[in-house]
Image: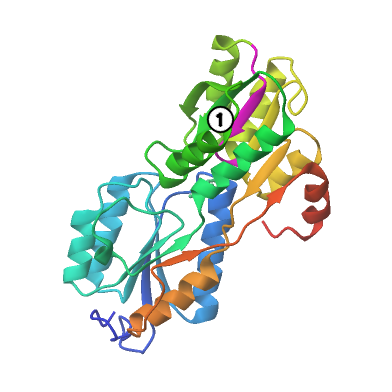
Amino acid sequence: GGGGAGAAGGSQGDGKITMGFSQVGAESGWRTANTKSVQDAAKSAGIELQFSDAQQKQENQLKAIRSFIQQKVDVIAFSPVVETGWDAVLLEAKRAGIPVILTDRAIDSDDTSLYATFLGSDFVEEGRKAGKWLVDNTQGAVNVVELQGTTGAAPAIDRKEGFEEVIAARPDIKVVATQSGDFTRAGGKQVMEAFLKSTPDIDVVYAHNDDMGLGAIEAIKAAGKKPGVDIKIITVDAVKDGMQALANGEINFIVECNPLLGDQLMDLAKKVVAGQEVPKRVVTEETTFTPEQAKAALPERQY
Ligand code: GYE
C-alpha cells in the first residue's frame, strides 16, 4: 500500500494494488457466492486481496478495517453488517488517505465524504417486488409472517420497508408476526417453528433471503403442512438451493439479488486508487423468478 490517493504502490512497492476487504460472514448461499466472486475478480484484476471474515459481528469488522489502515492498504472495501456506527473508523481511513468502497450493504451516515462509492442492490425495490407479487397473486384476507434479516442490516431494513409500502394498498393483507432469523437457514427454521406454534392461520411467509425461507420449509414440513401449497413462500436472493425449491413448488416467488459484484468492485477500486471520478452509487441489475422461470434458469445458474 502506498497509502495516499493515486499512489497504487502495493505493499511491496511492486505496483500492485492492495485491497483490504471486510466481509460480513458466511451466513448464506448468497454470501458464499459473493465471497467467491470478490476473490476470483481480485485474481483476474491483479489486485492483492486481504480478505477478512467478520462472522456477522460489527466489532470484527471495525478491527479488520483498523488493521487495513495500519497496513496502509491502497483501498478498503467492506460490506457493513449493520447500517450504523461506522463514522469514527471511516474518519480514520479518510485521515490516512485510504479510499473506502461500500459493497453490497450501505451505511447510515450523514457524511457521504466517508466513502468513495457504494456498489450494490436496491433493497427497497426488492421488497417492493415481493409485495407486488403478493398483491397481484392473492385475494381476500392474507396472514403473512415475516422472517427478517439481521437486525439493523440495510437489506433487512429496506426489504421490510419496500414490502410494507406496496402491501399498504391491500388492508386485508396483514403481517401478523415478524422477527429476525439473522439471514441463516437455522435462524429461519427456528423462528418459523415458533411462529407455527404461536400464530394460527399463516397463509404466507415473506423471508428476507432464500436461506431463511429454506429453513422455514423444514419447519413447515415438520408441522405436517405443505410448503408452497398450505403456506406460500416468497424469498429474496435466487441462489441455487432457493431456485431448486422454487422449481419444485416449495417456494412460490423469488426476487433476485445479485451477489456477483466482484468484477465491478475491482473496476471501481482501480479507478478510485488512480484518483478518477466514479459514480457515488452503482446499482446492480436484477429480476424476479416464478417456478417456470426458475426451471428455465436453473441449468445455467452459476451459484
Ligand atoms: O440477501 C443475504 C445475505 O446483504 C444482500 O445478505 C445481502 C444479503 C443477502 O446474508 O442472503
Q: Can the viewer see residue 210?
A: no
Magenta stretch? Answer: 201-209
Instruction: Tell me where residue 275 appears, x and y as whole percent.
Output: 32, 84
Dividing the picture into quarters, in which one does residue 114 lie? Answer: bottom left
Give the quarter of the figure containing the N terminus: bottom left
Extreme-bottom residue of the structure:
14
Report which residue position mark 1 lands on: 188
Q: How is the image coloured?
A: rainbow
Position of 99 with respect to 43 (left or right) is left
Q: Is residue 26 left or right of residue 247?
A: left
Number of numbered tags placed on the structure image: 1
Q: Tell me which corner region of the image, top left, top right, bottom left or bottom right, holds residue 227.
A: top right
Mark 1 beta carbon near ligand 1 (under 8 Å)? no
Of residues 174 and 29, the one drawn nearer to the viewer in this rendering? 174
Q: Is residue 270 above or below residue 88?
A: below
For image coordinates 40% across by 56% down, the residue present is: 79
Q: Nearer the viewer, residue 75 or 264?
A: 264
Residue 12, quarter of picture? bottom left
Residue at coordinates 52% horizontally, 59% vertically from top-left? 35
Q: Residue at x 24, y 79 (%)?
A: 3
Give the amino acid type for the residue marked by disc 1 in the picture.
Gly
Give the quarter of the figure containing the C terminus.
Answer: bottom right
Within the magenta stretch, is there residue 87? no
227 or 132, nearer to the observer:
132
Which residue is at 16% across, 70% downward? 95
Residue 78 appears left or right of 5: right
* Image location (x, y in percent) of residue 133: 68, 38
The percent position of residue 165, horizontal first and vertical second, equals 51, 37
